[in-house]
Image (spheres, grey):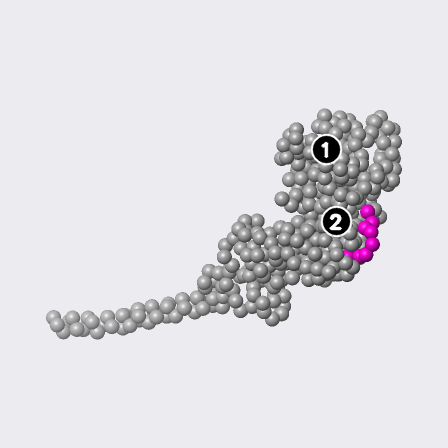
Amino acid sequence: MAKNKKKSMQNAAPAILLALMALLLIGMLAAIIVMMKRQKNPDSGNGTPAQIAEQLPDSSAAEVTTTENSTTTEETTTTTEPLPPGSVTGISLSFYSATMNVGDGAIMPIVTMLPDDAEDRSEMWESDNPAVAEVDDIGRITAVGAGTCTVRVTSVSNPRVFAEVQITVKEGAAVTTTLPLSTPPQTVPDTSAAPETTSGSSTAQSPASSEPASSQAAPATTATQPAAPRSDIEVINGITYVQGVLIVNKTYSLPSSYNPGGLTPEAQAAFNEMAAAAKKDGYTLTICSGFRSYSYQKQLYSNYVTRKGQYEADRCSARAGHSEHQTGLAMDINYAGSSFDNTPEAKWLGENCWKYGFIIRYPKGKEEITGYKYESWHVRYLGKEWAKTIYDSGLTLEEYFGITSKYAE
């Protein structure tokens, strides 16, 4: 019996050996697969995603190829430690260049810290040449002397993240008249290269693209990824132009001193032409509110706040310096109230005002974008070419130009 048992074990030995070899082979294959995966995606081994440019430290310049798990940048690094949750990773500004005159009132870009849920949004401001322009702790920039300088805002919680405004200061009194009306571009320029920004020039008169700029929102700027600022936004003597179009909304304001004295001759002539055309179709259009000065708008807004409270006032009335009526390019037609909405005149205005250079400035359903509830009676003069372009796009000015309309507070 012992002999049979010994013989049985001898017969089983090859099978056991084969099983052990099979297990060893499977283990080796598994190890090879894991190594191949790690070579293909080196970050997967520790669960840390590719780091965005704002998290990279100073390093030598090099070109990095974009992959699905990486961010294009002009810097390379050997450090991939992520920032703590809630850290600021980018800053965007409402404008990146401005031309001022000595004696102008202060201007202040609106700062947006990214991401929206960043915990510490504290800012630190500095000017590289206070003899040209000074900046205070909240970002108010004041012209001091002729020249150029750079004003920088830096995240206190993450000093690697910053944005800059190029300032040009000229001697002499500020010119309060607006630039001539621009027209939309006829061709789409080559945008393969990053645009240059020239402070103090009328770059706003040369639109960067004929396409809606909703995807051209002001870029975040960081120490490791300096973003090209938008060259189509320029502030000249406190007045903001986007692709040559004067912009006034909750983000972009006018100086208190700006006063054209009434509707501009172009806006008045355009209204006269539009009113004559409406009359031929059997409709009467009149201007119930045209130009408003800074001081008048200040009192008007204050009255709304007293009657309705600030939240409701901000939905239907602009704060002083933020009203399109101060430009001399906006007007209210027939009656400034919701009772105008369903009138034949309102329908005609909405369908035809673009033909004469106007747009309905605050369309229905766009309050979150424009900052104001629907106003069927409020038209803004842009000139016939821009009005047709905006009307055909179906977008608001904010959407078309990729800008915001939010107060700084």
Q: Position of residue 208 (x, y in %)?
A: 76, 54
Q: Secondary structure at mark 1?
A: helix
| Residue occupying the point 46% across, 60% down | 47
- Is residue 361 visible in the rendered image? The answer is no
Q: Secondary structure at mark 2?
A: loop
Q: Quadrant of residue 150?
A: bottom right
Disc number placed over residue 258 in the picture, else none: none
**Disc 1 designates what residue?**
300
**Furthest-left residue in view?**
1
Q: Is residue 234 above or below residue 320?
A: below
**Disc 2 designates what residue?**
105
User: Is 296 on the left-hand or right-hand side of 311?
Assistant: right
Q: Position of residue 268 (x, y in %)?
A: 86, 37
The mark nearer the N terminus, 2 or 1, is 2
In the image, the segment drawn in magenta is: 167-176
Q: Quadrant of residue 320?
A: top right
- Is residue 113 visible in the rendered image? The answer is yes
User: Is 334 on the left-hand or right-hand side of 141?
Assistant: right
